[in-house]
Amino acid sequence: DLVKKNKEIKSLANKLEISHKQTDTLRTKLDKVRESHRHELSSLESTIDDLNAELEVNRPRVAQLETQIEQMELQVASMKTKNNKLENEVYDLTEFKTTNEIMSTKLQDVEITITTLMRKHGELMLKSKKQEDSLKAAAAERERKILEIALLEEKLRASTVQEHEELVKAILAQEEDIRGVLDRIRM
């Protein structure tokens, strides 16, 4: 049993030695990694210092850029307001254009209606002129006939007056003849 224990102790000693070697190797690696990290940390701290120095140098420029950004944001807000107004104007102009197109269509309809009415008016005026000319011709013909009738009446009256005068003369002449005969008879 002692041999067995001795073998176990040797085995454990070997394992312990291997474990120490591994631990030493890991410690060496860890030391190298720590050293590497120290160098990186030192390098990063140096970079941070450089960046902080650069930041201090650029701080006024950053402040100026922030001011410019604020001004630009105000300009953007102003531009948005103007853009909204322009969009409203575009909408109004679109509405106006639509209304204008409707009015244009209606004006074309009115123009067609006026043209039709003027054509009909022209036809009616021509027809009215023809009727007026016809009425004037009829009135002139009627007046001519009235004049003819008046002339005939005048001739008839003159003829009747003349016949009357002749009859009166003839009667007076007969009356004188009769008086002359009566005077002769009375005598």
Image (cartoon, rainbow, N blue to C red):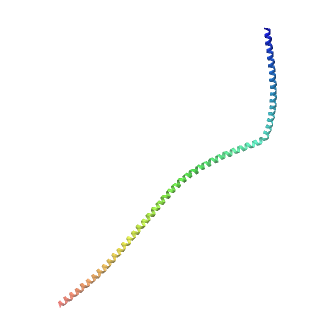
Q: Where is residue 138 in the image (x, y as percent from the top left)?
A: 37, 70
In the image: residue 148, left or right of residue 17: left
Identified at 81% across, 27% down, the residue is 32
Q: Position of residue 140 (x, y in %)?
A: 38, 72
Q: In which quarter of the image is residue 70?
A: top right
104, above or below 47, in the image: below
Identified at 32% across, 77% down, the residue is 152
Q: Position of residue 41 (x, y in %)?
A: 80, 31
48, above or below 125, in the image: above
- The N terminus - image quarter: top right
Q: Nearer the viewer, residue 6 or 145?
A: 6
95, above or below 121, in the image: above
Q: Which residue lies furthest to the bottom in this view?
A: 187
Identified at 60% across, 50% down, the residue is 90
- The C terminus - image quarter: bottom left
Q: Where is residue 53 in the image (x, y as percent from the top left)?
A: 80, 38
Q: Residue furthest top?
A: 1
In the image: residue 47, left or right of residue 125: right
In the image: residue 5, left or right of residue 147: right
Q: Nearer the viewer, residue 109 or 4?
A: 4
Q: Which of 118 and 157 is in front in this view?
A: 118
Identified at 24% across, 86% down, the residue is 173
117, above or below 167, in the image: above
Q: Which of 174 and 187 is in front in this view?
A: 174
